[in-house]
Image: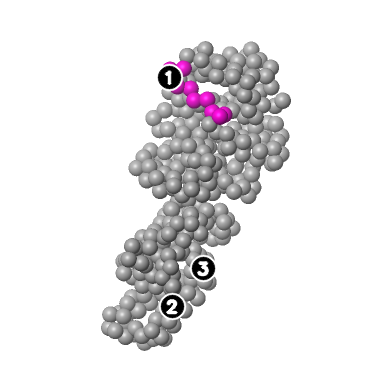
């Protein structure tokens, strides 16, 4: 089976490298920034995204802030009829 | 490891690929061009994947399980694509934590979502948090489901009642406490029947307060007071949403 990246299993340094490869970085306050060093906002809460709670949406390189509310919003929006694979 | 091998690993074993890229970086061999190639490969891979990456994969699964609960299935069937379904999912999740007695997790989750929900949904969001904290969200859904079945209401009609209940929760809820004597309970319910006359209202009691509430409502039903004022009330929903005591919820519906 094809392997997947599990963010919680990655040490911070490796997670940072992964996010950089996806076109992001973190600023000196620990928030996610884009390639222009502009802070990225979560599409569901409109808040800046702390590095620790960054999630990447399936099929995209979009980053959201992870919380019960944002994940519920995502499920409502997209996952209704889609399969959620193990180790997401 | 050669460069092409890493590109292959990005598809087959991305964690190993990350390790290899990290190794190149440490050895000072990660050129800008290589980084750009790997970056493109990772981004392409991500775009073709059904699954995302989250530090809380368990939470996603727990939330998806809420979609399989009778309350959520019922609500979804009643309302179809309603914008508050995502709030209901969070509410039912909080309620589940409360039933399971997971107090610490409950408080942490509530604190985490409180600001987000209030900020994005205002009063309606706050209502869902209150419904979940009081453990009456699933009871309210059950009652609305009963009403829809018993009165043969259309989806539009039941959706209006649901929206009304959510919007006016404070106005339509009578909390019965241990201090409420029968006469007081009677007057509070009578006030709703005759003065305020909402489409729907609820009476909630727990523990010792239930006996008085039960007696008053039974008396009002047997004396036909409710029907006389155009209201019906089905048997109460009894739940243990608060692990320490049973909670009773009566819902009164106006039919004229």
The secondary element bearing badge 3 is classed as loop
What's the residue at 70%, 36% (across, down)? Answer: B153
Q: Position of residue B9 (x, y in %)?
A: 41, 78
Quadrant for the N terminus of chain B, please.
Answer: bottom left
The residue wearing badge 2 is B39
Estimate how packed mark 1 is, as few (under 14), some (14 to 19) or many (20 or more) residues with alpha carbons within 10 Å.
some
Q: Are marks 3 and 2 in contact (CB under 8 Å)?
A: no
Question: Callout 1: helix, strand or loop?
Answer: loop
Magenta span of residues: B171-180
Q: Name the residue under label 3.
A: A60
Label 1 close to label 2 by CB (< 8 Å): no
In the rendered image, residue B18, in percent from the top left (x then y), is placed at 36, 75
* Chain where mark 2 sits: B
Instruction: Tell me the residue at 59%/19% (across/down).
Output: B191
Residue ID at (42%, 65%): A39
Q: Is residue B44 magenta?
A: no
Chain letter, disc 1 residue: B
- Crowd class of label 2 (few under 14; some 14 to 19; many from 20; radius 10 Å): many
How many numbered circles are shown?
3
* Name of the residue lying farthest toward the left: B27
Tag 1 residue: B178
Q: Which of marks 1 and 2 is nearer the N terminus?
A: 2
Q: In this view, does A37 lie above or below B60?
A: below
């Amino acid at each position: 089976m094809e392997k997947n990246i599990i963010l919680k299993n990655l040490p911070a340094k490796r997670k940072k490298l992964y996010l950089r490869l996806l076109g992001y970085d973190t600023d000196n306050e620990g928030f996610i920034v884009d390639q222009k060093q502009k802070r990225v906002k979560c599409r569901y809460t409109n808040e800046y995204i702390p590095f620790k709670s960054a999630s990447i949406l399936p099929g995209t390189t979009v980053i959201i802030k992870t919380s019960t509310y944002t994940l519920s919003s995502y499920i409502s929006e997209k996952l209704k009829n889609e399969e959620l694979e193990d180790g997401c | 490891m050669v460069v092409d091998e890493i590109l292959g690993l990005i598809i087959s074993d991305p964690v190993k690929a990350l390790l290899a890229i990290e190794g190149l970086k440490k050895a000072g061999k990660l050129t800008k061009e290589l980084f750009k190639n790997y970056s493109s490969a990772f981004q392409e891979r991500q775009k073709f994947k059904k699954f995302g990456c989250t530090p809380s994969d368990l939470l996603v699964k727990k939330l998806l399980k809420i979609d399989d609960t009778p309350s959520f299935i019922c609500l979804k069937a009643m309302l179809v694509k309603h914008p508050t379904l995502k709030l209901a999912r969070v509410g039912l999740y909080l309620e589940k934590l409360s039933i399971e007695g997971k107090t610490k997790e409950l408080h942490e989750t509530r604190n985490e979502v409180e600001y987000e929900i209030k900020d994005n949904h205002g009063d309606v969001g706050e209502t869902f948090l209150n419904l979940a904290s009081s453990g009456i969200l699933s009871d309210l859904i059950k009652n609305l489901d009963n009403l829809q079945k018993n009165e043969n209401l259309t989806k539009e009609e039941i959706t209006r009642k649901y929206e009304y209940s959510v919007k006016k929760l404070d106005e339509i809820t009578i909390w019965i406490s241990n201090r409420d004597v029968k006469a007081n309970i009677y007057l509070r319910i009578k006030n709703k029947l005759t003065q305020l006359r909402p489409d729907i209202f609820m009476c909630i009691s727990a523990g010792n307060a239930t006996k008085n509430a039960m007696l008053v409502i039974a008396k009002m039903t047997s004396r036909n007071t409710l029907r006389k004022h155009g209201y019906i009330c089905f048997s109460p929903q009894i739940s243990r949403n608060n692990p320490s005591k049973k909670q009773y919820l009566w819902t009164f519906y106006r039919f004229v």
